[in-house]
């Protein structure tokens, strides 16, 4: 009885220590599980991006998709996401060069939806998004980090957060390469719903137009897409600037075309390519 009474506090102490130990072990398990969960959740994101890249590339019948992926990745992986200059993508362009499609090349600015609605329905023009690199990366966001070999798809700098960001430099570089091979009669869809259709700071103005070479390009036709309320027409000042910036020797046309006419024409299977404007 006495032994039992004096033994009781010792047993209680031991039990308390055991409970504390169990709680600590449980906490440790929870912490490890959360950490593993977080890293597992990050992993698929990066794998998902690569899968999207490779799958879209294969759908496009790219013959060296893993080589193109490697050339793409080296541009931004293990780099500060605000320090990826346009030249970083030079090896990518070399791995997936653009083929010229004379008389069918379509450029655009501030009219992405109208243009792609049209090119999807009618096989008349080719935009950058109809080429391997344009198609594979359209709508995606990516960046790297210093001292990491991974690709991130969130937490990346936005378009105007810093100039040398991976997505912005990519579009600048591929747009330049696409404009470099422009040939024959070239078309550009610009917006008649804004005050400056030849928009300052746009890729079309700062990169593409400057690179149209008069030894390859005969004509540039601007299709100014208008809505009921026209904000700009073909006499717009910014379009005068465009003509000044266009290399001498390239002819220039401008046509004001209602958006409704473009969509009606694209849905009409009997309409020929030359009849939409
Ligand atoms: O800056 P923009 O237009 O004048 O660029 C459009 C111009 C087109 O002629 C294309 O050849 O530059 C090329 N281009 C793309 O193909 C493209 N696809 C998706 C440029 N940008 C592209 N994007 C995204 O659209 C890109 O992320 C950027 O943010 C916009 C640019 O569109 P904009 O200002 O209407």
Image (tube, rainbow, N blue to C red):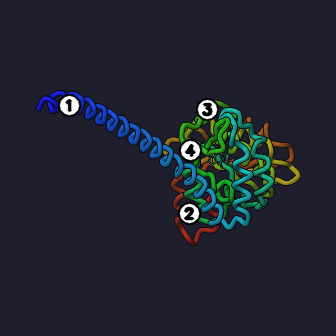
Distance CA(mark 4)–CA(mark 1): 62 Å
Mark 2 crowd level (few <14, some 14–19, many ≥20, 10 Å Cα) = many
Camera-nearest label, 4 or 1: 1
Relative horizontal placement of residue 15, taking residue 97 as reference (left or right): left
Element assignment for label 2: helix
Q: Residue at x 76, y 48 (%)?
A: 252
Residue that numbered label 4 is attached to:
153
Residue that numbered label 1 is attached to:
7
Q: Are marks 2 and 1 in contact (CB under 8 Å)?
A: no
Q: Position of residue 171 (x, y in %)?
A: 68, 45
Q: Earlier in the sequence, mark 4 or mark 1?
A: 1
Residue that numbered label 2 is attached to:
266
Q: Position of residue 12 (x, y in %)?
A: 22, 31
> Which of 13 and 31 lies nearest the eye of the viewer?
13
Q: Earlier in the sequence, mark 1 or mark 3?
A: 1
Camera-nearest label, 2 or 1: 1
């Amino acid at each position: 009885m006495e032994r039992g009474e004096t033994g009781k506090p010792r047993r209680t102490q031991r039990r308390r220590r055991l409970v504390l130990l169990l709680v600590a072990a449980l906490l440790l398990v929870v912490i490890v599980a959360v950490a593993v969960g977080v890293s597992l959740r990050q992993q698929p994101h990066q794998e998902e991006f690569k899968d999207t890249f490779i799958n879209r590339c294969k759908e496009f019948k790219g013959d060296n998709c893993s080589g193109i992926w490697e050339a793409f990745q080296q541009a931004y992986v293990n780099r500060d996401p605000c320090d990826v200059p346009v030249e970083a993508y030079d090896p990518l362009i070399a791995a997936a060069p653009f083929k010229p499609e004379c008389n069918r090349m379509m450029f655009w600015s501030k009219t992405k939806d109208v243009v792609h609605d049209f090119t999807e329905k009618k096989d008349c023009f080719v935009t950058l998004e109809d080429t391997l690199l344009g198609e594979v990366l359209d709508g995606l966001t990516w960046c790297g980090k210093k001292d990491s070999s991974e690709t991130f798809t969130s937490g990346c700098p936005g378009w105007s957060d810093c100039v040398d960001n991976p997505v912005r430099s990519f579009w600048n570089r591929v747009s330049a390469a696409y404009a470099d091979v422009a040939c024959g009669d070239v078309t550009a869809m610009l917006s008649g719903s804004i005050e400056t259709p030849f928009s300052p700071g746009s890729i079309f103005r700062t990169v593409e137009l400057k690179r149209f070479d008069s030894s390859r390009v005969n004509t540039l036709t601007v299709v100014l897409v208008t809505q009921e309320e026209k904000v700009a027409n073909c006499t717009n000042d910014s379009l005068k600037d465009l003509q000044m910036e266009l290399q001498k020797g390239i002819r220039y046309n401008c046509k004001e075309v209602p958006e409704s006419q473009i969509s009606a024409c694209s849905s009409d299977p009997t309409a020929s390519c030359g009849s939409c404007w």
